[in-house]
Image: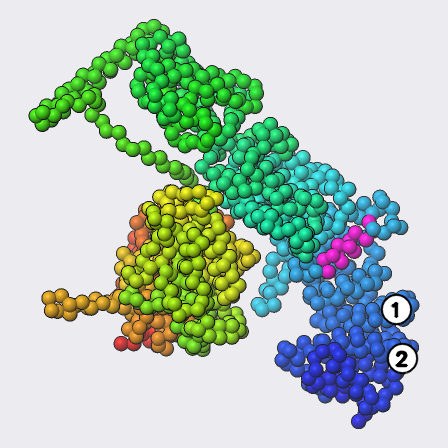
Amino acid sequence: RKPGPDRLAALLLNHRGYAAKQKRAAFRAFVAGLDLAPPQAAALAVETAIRLHLGQLKGVERPSERKRILEVEQLGNFFGGLLLKAACKAAPQHCLSLLAPGKLRVLAPAKLQQRDAGRMLTLLHSVYKTMRDAYPLSALLTGLEVVRPALDAFVNDNHKQEMPSLTTQTALLLLLDDFRLLVPARREFRTYVLVRWLALLNPALGRGRSGKIIASLITSKWNDPTTSAQEAEAECRAALRTAFAFLCGAPLGPPRTDKAKGKKGKNNAGSDVSPSLALLFDSMPRTLLPDVATFVAQVAPTMDDRVLEEAGGRMLLWEMTGSVHLWTKALLEGYLQGNKSEILVELIARSCQPLLRQLFKWKTRRGAFFLVRFLLLGCQHTSRTFRDNLGLLKEVAIALALEKKKEEEEGAKQKEKEKKELGRNEEKGDSSSAEAFGKEFAEMCYCLMYQHAGYPVEYFPLLEALRALAKQQPPDKEKMAILQGYRWEGQKVDRSDDVLAGGGDTGGRDGKPLGLQNLGNTCYMNSVLQALYLSDAFRNGVLSWDARRGNTNNHTHARSKQDTDGAAASSSSAPNSANLETLGKLQELFAFLRMSQRPAIAPRTFMQTLPRIFRDGSQQDATEFYKYVLDSTAAGLLLGAGAGADADRKEQKEMEIEAQKEEEKEREDTEQKGMEEEKEPGQKPSSSSSSSAALPGFAFEGAVVAGSSFKELVSHYTGYSGRMPRLPKWAACGGAVLGLEGGTANVTKVYREMVAAGTPVAALWLQDWSGFVKDSFGTRVLWNWELDRTLYAGWDAMLEELRTTDTRVMTYVNPYLFARMNSTDKRRNYFKEAAERGFLVRNSSGLPYLQHCGAETFTFGTIDLYNPEAADWYASEILEKNMIVGSNTSGWMADFGEYLPFDAVIGGEESGPVDPQYVHNKFPEDWAELNHRAVKAQQRDGDIVYFHRSASTRSPQYAALFWAGDQLVTWDAHDGLHSALIAILTGGLSGMSMMHSDVGGYTMFDKCVEILGQKLCLGYYRGCELLMRWTEMSAFTDAMFRTHIGSRPGPKEAQVWSSNTSKAHFSAFAKVHQALCQYREHLVEEAHQTGLPMARHPLLEFPDDEELIEMTTQVMLGPEIMVAPVLTKEAEAVEVYLPEIPDDAGAGVIGETWVRWPGMEAVSGMWEGGRVKADAPLGVPAVFLRSGFEDRFPDSFQALKELGSSLLDEATKGTFQCPV
């Protein structure tokens, strides 16, 4: 046949070989069969490559499948590379003539924004790079002139155009990098075009070669030996000023176009600045660092604080690699020099946590710590910035301790080898080790706790974690020197949020309270003394006490034997000599605090007057010490108060005291006499003169949270308890999480049915992944945490099928191990292994403490979380090895945690015994922390979701999600559907910002007994209507939309796949949950940042509406959506209270209207006392949107609107009527 490019293209497109070697063989066979000479072969190769690359094929239909389209693109690159290189070597002159500018003019893109520009540039780059060794550069550049027009247009109109596609950008950058003579000589290209390009660069390209090429092009003048130093510096300064302008919000380009709707969006302002811009700073000469600080200091006073805050905030979110941290600090120092230190305080609040998270990565650790130390140690005017991040600082300390332990276990050679593999070479010497870095980190934390003394309860968890890094604190002088070195000059000390703040004349340097030096575990004492000193009444009473008057009284009892032995001092109303000595030294100390010009006072002489228990160098309870100080000083103050007052007043006071004593004595005598008269004959009279009974001492530790609104209270409380991590997008709005069980065949069958019914499925939750046992309670999960590959045969194949629809798998675990494993089960017996190694909670005999759950035969042991070795074993062997890695799970139910016995024996050899009564309520928090630690160790935080039902105060900081526990399959508010709503309402006020429930409930019951010969049966069964109403509520209220098969699934129990009706209904509301994705992502971020719950009590949004105070039947999803679930069986309507929306309720709220979904009718003016009766047949729940929702969240509104119309149609047809 006559040879031609179309024939060759057809042959290669239909050739099944995909590798370049096979393509080359096919081409050679084709050429050999046609007996072509080398020049002809070259011509054929070039023409075919060009036409294939541009899709200009005659007689060859361009394939439509994605794989074949990619194959065509691969062919273009192949011909431009391997094949073309061979052809040009065979006939170089002919090849060059074929590639002359005139011949290639068709390939030149007129604009870089046109569709095929990337392909054209890629082909040109491949062709000329292939030939650069064979021909003079001038000849090649002559051919490359075809790119000039497009490049010039890109430079000249850069600020008016959108950026080219990623493919075009990559191709153009590779071309410019290999042929630097193509780079425009205009200074604007480097100082504006390339900086803008870098600021808009996709982060995926920025992490690769593309970002580095742009940065090197910007700094090319600096590295050019022919350029003068002055010119090079001028170029770099201009580029830095341009970058600063973009960081401050300068427009990055023309309005973006929404191609789907044809609408113009907002300008590409600074909010779109790419983190790739950090590469520019990293490539700049460090000699310009002082110039940056000076420049920022000069312009800062003329700029809006919000603009400067945004600029700093963007830089602080970058990865702190290379020298990025130095440039960031230079910017912040510019703010300080420009008297803008208040901006840094705001930046700490918004950026400290992201910076601290970078401490977990070796790549960014050094740079991030450089800035963390600068910010936290520099901001000495308030403790809030430090205390808000105590939880994260503790996590970092724990992670460093684990790394340190790992380094110690590894050898020195292995450690060096691992560092090289991981690229941990950013710092030289021992400073890169976890041990050395941990000491620096601990030193910073100790300095901060020293600077912001007065919060021992809050600091205790961090102190415990720091012990593994540095057992001894630096001396106080060293801490003071460090703090002085980092202190920001000119900052005003504002202690308005500090517990040591107080009114009145407290003296000290410049009227500022002085510090008390720590004499060795005396922070409790210093805290109490400072608090008492800052009480105006108490301080003035101590300072005005007359020591002579106090010593002349007749009550000079010696110190009691109990006191000498270390017990707390007697609280007698009469002061003894020891009490008076304590009061005298306290007065002396207060005088120093008031008059001294020293920065701190050492309370040694005062401490010497205290009982031995407060002098032995151990940490003591602040409440006990507080009580001792008040008891030991009260009588002395009473006798000596008013020493400087006139004589009459003193005499009057003494007479009142004596009269009071006589009255009390008379009353006591009367009471004693009455008691003796009531005694039985022959009973001896009591020797006690008091009728009061002493109660055992109990101390409570707590915190009072204050705020000006309910929202602020919740936010402040969650700041104390810890805020929940961000819920991953796949869980928040990826669709339904189907609770299934029964093995591979049953699970895949139901999954396929639900997908066929149109259900979006985010994950399958398989709680029986480890197997099951049967007892009187029902079919139970086997608490031996290893995949049952008999029940789930073909597990890996099932996961592969699920991946085709982006469906994940979730499992189940708890902190218990089943004690009665079947001997025929060949899997590891984790209970036996844990018991032999001493990893289980023990009874008083030292044996595993066995408990039962649900049935007497279901016995289990509890993992001892307070034995560090046991906790590490459970995390690594079960959570990491068996679940995350071995089963490839994306999450699990982290069940239970509330069963720790009060009489258990817990703790390991290293940790020592732990009081179970002290940690009983804390156990759920530590259980959550263990799950968090395992996920973090596998670097899956932000992706894996584990959810809890039990919690302690500080559990939220570790829990990815909560659920409302095991409800009955009933409607009531005690333990049914209504109770799930109440749990979500109250949980949101308790720090559980993201919650959900088992759709349909969990606990089922079916039991018959004989009573007096009569058979009595009692049962709780899940009905179709209950399941549907629960589904409708959860579609809006639940952070994750998850079903449960129930405790005793059977033919009577309705499931979401039981009938076509239930499938259609559940699928529709799974889509509703998914439709709110844009809104839910906003609420997830809000919950993480502020602690406000996703599903919240309406009182949070309308705090002045008294009608809402006791409401438990309605809930709001964020501030925009009001939901009134149907909570009564067979109800077709529900009464809804719609609060009146004031005009100033919030930005964007228009008028005073609500919009009813799914019909989208406005409800304005329909109130009668704020109440509306809303029709709510099955499939049409009572849901109301605040007006303006469509503007604030257009994607969610549009999706809801479309689904609402469909739901109304189906409800009208009766699609959702439950079968009889």
* First of labels 1, 2 by sequence position: 2
Residue 1061, compared with residue 732, is above or below; it is: below
Crowd tier of the residue under label 2, counting other residues whose Cα lies within 10 Å: few below 14, some 14–19, many 20 or above: some
- Amino acid at the residue labelled 2: Ala
Read off the magenta span: 209-222
Residue at 90% x, 70% y: name it: 135
* In front of the other: 1040 or 750: 750
Judging from the image, what secondary structure is the residue with disc 1 in?
Answer: loop
- Answer left or right for 582 relative to 442: left
Visual colour scheme: rainbow
- Amino acid at the residue labelled 1: Asp
Q: Position of residue 297 (x, y in %)?
A: 69, 37
Q: Residue furthest bottom?
A: 1
Q: Position of residue 718 (x, y in %)?
A: 44, 46
Crowd tier of the residue under label 1, counting other residues whose Cα lies within 10 Å: few below 14, some 14–19, many 20 or above: few
Residue at 46% x, 35% y: name it: 456
Question: In the image, which disc is placed on residue 133?
Answer: 1
The Cα atoms of the two marked residues, 1 and 2, are separated by 15 Å
Residue 216 is covered by the magenta coloring: yes
Q: Which part of the image, by quadrant, shows the C terminus? A: bottom left
Q: Position of residue 1152 (x, y in %)?
A: 40, 54
Judging from the image, what secondary structure is the residue with disc 2 in?
Answer: loop
* In front of the other: 1172 or 787: 787
Q: Which part of the image, by quadrant, shows the N terminus? A: bottom right
Residue at 61% x, 40% y: name it: 440
Residue 646, compared with residue 438, is above or below; it is: above
Image quarter of residue 616? top left
Q: How many circles with numbers are drawn on the protein?
A: 2
* In front of the other: 257 or 500: 500
- Principal SS element in the magenta part? helix
Q: Which residue is mark 2?
A: 91
